[in-house]
Amino acid sequence: MELSKTFNCPKCGTAYRQVNNTAIHYECSCGNVNRIDGYLQSESNQKLKKLPLYSRFKQDTKGYFNQDAFTLTGALVVVFKNAALNFWTMKMQDGSVRLLEESYGFQTVLTPVTGINTKGLYDRLNKASTTKDTIIDHLGTYRLVQQDDFWGFDVKGESAADILGAEERFLFQSRDGATYIEIWLAGKDCRIFKQEPVETIEELELSAINAAIQFNEKDYADCASCGKEVYIPYFPLVKNFVCPHCTTLNKFSERWRWEKDQKVPRLQNNTAARIPLGTNLHLLGDDFKVIGATIKEDNDEAQWQEFTLYCETDGGFAFLSVFNGNFMLVYETMEFPLLPSVGQSSLYFEDTFYLFYNDYTTKLLWAEGYVFDDFASNNRRGFTYDYIAPPYLFSLERDGDKNNYWFRGEYVDRKELENQETPLVLPKKIGLGTLEPSSKFSNRQVIIGGALAIILFVLVHLGIDLTGTPAKVVLSNTYTFSDTSKNIEITSEPFELDNFRTNVGIDISSDVMNNWVSLDYALVNTQTGQEYNAGKDLEYYSGSDGGENWSEGSNTYDHLFTAVPKGRYVLNIEAEKGTDAGMVTSLYVKAQAGSKRALNFWLPFILILSWPVILLIRNYSKEQERWA
Ligand SMILES: [Zn+2]
Ligand SMILES: [Zn+2]
């Protein structure tokens, strides 16, 4: 292992002892960026610029990535055409170097991939497209996600990121969607990294961290139109602002200066949400500050508002979209599904199907504050594709075949906006929001909830059957008509009903054939005299007619006395034999205390089942409104 060297700054002479022997740059305490890649010199690359470092991370912080210990030695700050990113040098315990890429609230780890045959890769990169396969040697088949141009860089602390000569940055996603590769192209040299997401900063177990990103108080730019000073704290993360003095949209250009885009037209639409710049909003559990606002229009002339929100705690940006008084929070995401093919009706990502909702082009109509849009792009803006699984959205912005930007959206209930600390003027709500859930419960929740309720009900019912008092036979006897009398009078042995309320079931059957028997019976409380009466004629006829057998009536009957109070009872039955030619000789009577009525199960069962069915129907009809 080479020993660390000590260098003396060519500008001020201050000695510096390098931390990492593969370091390429360090920033001297005098502010000079020195190159120590082999030999010492003041960095003279024309892309070296003065850039602020806006980061959650600190120099000399220690942490872990996948159990590998690292130290952050310094950062390379890079401004690209479409983004601004920090690449922290992670000096690993084994002396190797990885990069912690950070910006807009995201972090990924870049691990250099070596042993790649880069022959011909330069040509393939030039032809790379978001819709065609690019083979990257043994790493496999990838598709381009984004291609961006290097505009400028700066170094803080000691950096081992080999930026020299880099002109373009490519982000590729594997054909199975599972892995990402980042490539820096410098002339015909390629630096290839495996890119892995860091889900949360906590995962890195850092020894120190900035609780929030502090913007420089003294970042000002001169408006390219009126020349007045404008505070630009979010530069280079945001590269467009509307001058508050002359309402000209300024955009930062590759020529490394602010250029005027267009004067923002006077606002005519007054039905919009009025949320002033600087308003603090608490949405979906995060704190945001409104730093910009736009009004946009799609190719169907539908107009909506988009507020630029900055989340100080994680350094991320988000957008509050307002359409017809419905709200959603939209933010860029670094984890996304594979690019859908033209006309693809759904996306599948993380166990959820997102249905194709709309595709459109957007046009900027109006803006104020710090924004990510400009008027110059209106004529060459790509397509946006929205896929929804309320309350969530995946939105894909395609800029030709070179850039896919993926956004996630989430429905924000109007009440959240009505309950902000600062009262807001909100437009009237019209219709169902794009991401507004049809009901408080999704179809899936309704089905699961309904099924659970039914299972619980059945279990409780079974439980009662198993543990409750079983039906007790209080009378079981056969009574025969004598030859002399056509009447039978029966009084059962007395029986006790011990429960507060008991059902008493009576089952009667007879050998009646081509005749009838008339029954009257009464359950009599022997203590109070209280009677419960019922009656029924049993009739049964059968024969044959033209070779076909027929029968009508029934020779059995059952009756349930429900909720009979506690007490001592007898059952009195009076039976009268019919006078038809057929026969009836005997009756069999069985009485049971504690009998159940089938309705006791089915009525509540149907009531419970009707709840999810009604919700599903309501969800369905609401869905028709969304897609209308
Ligand atoms: Zn110096
Ligand atoms: Zn101005």
Image (tube, helix red, strand yellow):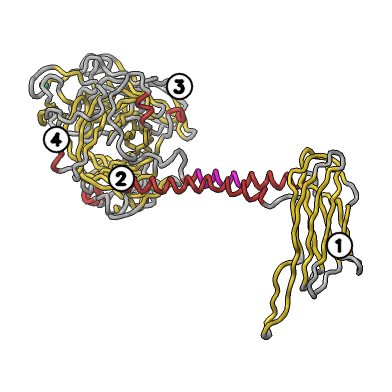
**Looking at the image, is 137 positioned above or below residue 205?**
below
Judged from the image, the secondary structure of the residue bearing numbered disc 3 is: loop
Marked residue nearer the N-terminal end (3 or 2): 3
Q: Secondary structure at mark 2?
A: strand
Residue sitting nearer the eye, 409 or 412: 412
320 with respect to 378 (left or right): right
Which mark sits nearer the N-terminus, 2 or 1? 2
**Mark 2 neighbour class, 10 Å CA radius: few under 14, some 14 to 19, many 20 or more:** many
- Badge 4 crowding class, 10 Å Cα cut-off, few under 14, some 14 to 19, many 20 or more, is some
Amino acid type, callout 4 = Phe
On screen, 205 above or below 297?
above
| Residue assigned mark 4 | 375
Which is closer to the viewer, label 2 or label 4?
2
Q: Which residue is mark 3?
A: 207
Magenta residues? 445-454
The three-letter amino acid code for the residue at tag 1 is: Asn
Foreground of the two, 55 or 451: 451
* Circle 1: element type: strand
Badge 4 or badge 1: first in the primary sequence: 4
> Which of disc 3 and disc 1 is earlier in sequence?
3
Quadrant the N terminus occupies: top left
Q: Quick one: SS at disc 4?
A: loop
The residue depicted at 31 percent of the width and 31 percent of the height is 318
Mark 4 vs 1: CB contact within 8 A? no
The residue type indicated by label 3 comes to: Ser
Residue 626, quarter of picture: top left
Whichever of callouts 2 and 4 sits on the residue coming sooner in the sequence is: 4
**What residue is shown with label 2?**
386
Tell which of 500 and 168 is nearer to you. 500
Horizontal relation, residue 92 to residue 551: left or right: left
Instruction: Give the CA distance from mark 4 to mark 1.
Output: 103 Å
